[in-house]
Image (cartoon, grey):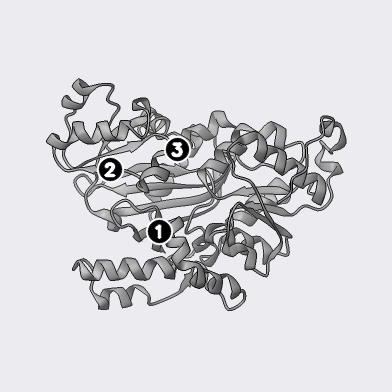
């Protein structure tokens, strides 16, 4: 691990103009399969890529990873900021583009954007914009302001508010801000099937997250078969590159924290809604906006937004759109050409999809022929690659550790 004290006069020693910067590369923060996807997307374009992670990761084994450094946790922020600036000085990374792969790092980059841009190019928008993706309460309030459909959502302040909720069960209790709720529960939400259980479960959720950060939301029926996403690189109020997918399987199936199987689809209405929301934010950069189609009224309802790359983002590359490279080119002032994505392209993450499929078959919700049919046609695994095989071997050998540590 690099441990270099940040010099007080660092600001006077580093270039503040892009004209002074040497040819740039990319620094990826986080080397699980999402980070590996960025590494390959840029490495295949002959862009040098460095990787940092606080723990074991498969991305360090990619042939496209030029250097790997072990880093401290994002929190406390001053230590991580010190590390990044010290790394930039030591490795001469002036003008390199930083790519985050998780929400905590996105928040850090957004809040420390000004200081970091003394050395790096930071694609993450400032906090006053990014917070509309990081805080679900703000996400939903912005959507409602611009008449973008969302599930019925309440923000109870007390027990009386809970009793007054007029919504169809089941409901879910979820935090506006992911952490520490997810780390402590390994769940994105708590399902409530009847009114009797609502006060007790809400009180339990309060012991994990502050009441002001909790919301109660109507659960849209249908599960992952009604789950869709728009992933894109957005600039100047338009898509410079995009992909629309149906996320057929996820782990776990009810409240998945990881997509295991997805396929590109042609739904112009979803593109239209996503464009409206990103324009309302004034957003720039890579993002994924998640929707569920409500079978009761047919509407696509916004669920959440990730202001970064996401688990299945390499599906876009397989469909003909290299999203990380588009953003890299744009940040370097290079001309980019918007490209349409191919439909019917499939993506899966083998080490999580197989256990998910087995569970669904045992529960009688998926047949073996249906599973085999889902694998027909153009497809790509998240990690497996003949061109770059070592990360897949590392993932297979480390699968028990990843299941225990991250749930894959």
The quarter of the image holding the C terminus is bottom left
- Nearest the viewer among 212 and 150 is 212
Mark 2 lies on a secondary structure that is strand
Q: Callout 3: 10 Å neighbours few (<14), some, many (20+)?
A: many
User: Alpha carbon of mark 2 to alpha carbon of mark 3: how far?
Assistant: 27 Å
Closer to the observer: label 1 or label 3? 1
Q: Position of residue 310 (x, y in %)?
A: 49, 53
Could you say whether the residue bearing mark 1 is in a helix, strand or loop? strand
Q: Going by the image, does 238 lie left or right of 200? A: right
Q: In the rendered view, tell whether residue 199 sits above or below residue 233.
A: above
Q: Earlier in the sequence, mark 2 or mark 1?
A: 2
Task: Identify the mark nearer the N-term, 2 or 3.
Answer: 2
Read off the residue under disc 2.
190
C-alpha gap between disc 2 and disc 1: 19 Å
User: Circles 1 and 3: CB distance less than 8 Å?
Assistant: no
Circle number at residue 385 = none
Quarter occupied by residue 172: top left
Instruction: Tell whether 211 sits left or right of 322.
Output: left
* Tag nearer the camera, 2 or 3: 2
Q: Determine which of the numbered discs, if any, sits on residue 277 in the image.
A: 3
Q: Which residue is disc 1 drawn over? A: 259
The structure residue drawn at horizontal position 78% and vertical position 36%, both measured from the top left corner, is 6
Between 21 and 35, the one lying in front of the other is 35
The mark closer to the camera, 2 or 1, is 2
Toward which corner of the image does residue 95 lie, by quadrant? top right
């Amino acid at each position: 691990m690099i441990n270099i004290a940040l010099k007080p006069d660092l600001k006077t020693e580093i270039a503040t103009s892009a004209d002074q910067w040497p040819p740039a590369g990319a620094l990826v923060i986080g080397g699980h399969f999402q980070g590996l996807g960025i590494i390959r997307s840029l490495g295949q374009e002959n862009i040098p890529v460095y990787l940092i992670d606080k723990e074991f990761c498969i991305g360090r084994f990619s042939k496209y990873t030029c250097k790997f450094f072990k880093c401290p946790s994002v929190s406390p922020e001053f230590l991580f900021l010190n590390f990044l600036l010290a790394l930039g000085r030591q490795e001469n990374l002036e003008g390199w583009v930083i790519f985050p792969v998780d929400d905590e790092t996105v928040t850090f980059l957004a809040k420390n954007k000004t200081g970091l841009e003394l050395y790096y190019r930071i694609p993450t928008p400032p906090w006053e914009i990014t917070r509309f993706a990081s805080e679900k309460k703000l996400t939903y309030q912005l959507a409602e302001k611009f008449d973008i459909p969302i599930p019925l959502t309440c923000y109870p302040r007390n027990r009386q508010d809970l009793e007054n909720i007029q919504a169809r069960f089941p409901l879910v209790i979820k935090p506006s801000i992911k952490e520490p709720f997810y780390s402590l529960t390994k769940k994105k939400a708590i399902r409530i099937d009847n009114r009797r259980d609502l006060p007790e479960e809400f009180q339990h959720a309060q012991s994990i997250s502050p009441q002001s950060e909790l919301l109660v939301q109507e659960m849209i029926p249908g599960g992952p078969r009604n789950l869709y996403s728009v992933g894109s690189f957005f600039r100047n109020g338009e898509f410079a590159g995009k992909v629309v997918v149906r996320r057929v399987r996820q782990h776990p199936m009810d409240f998945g924290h990881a997509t295991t199987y997805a396929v590109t689809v042609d739904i112009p209405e979803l593109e239209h809604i996503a464009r409206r929301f990103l324009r309302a934010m004034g957003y720039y950069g890579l993002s994924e906006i998640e929707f569920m189609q409500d079978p009761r009224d047919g509407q696509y309802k916004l669920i959440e937004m990730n202001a970064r790359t996401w688990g299945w983002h390499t599906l876009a590359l397989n469909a003909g759109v290299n999203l990380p490279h588009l953003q890299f080119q744009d940040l370097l002032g290079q001309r980019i050409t918007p490209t349409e994505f191919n439909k019917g392209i499939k993506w899966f993450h083998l080490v999580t999809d197989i256990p998910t499929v087995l569970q669904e078959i045992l529960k009688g919700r998926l047949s073996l022929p249906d599973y085999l049919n889902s694998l027909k046609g153009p497809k790509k695994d998240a990690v497996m690659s003949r061109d770059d095989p070592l990360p897949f071997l590392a993932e297979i050998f480390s699968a028990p550790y990843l299941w225990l540590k991250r749930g894959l």
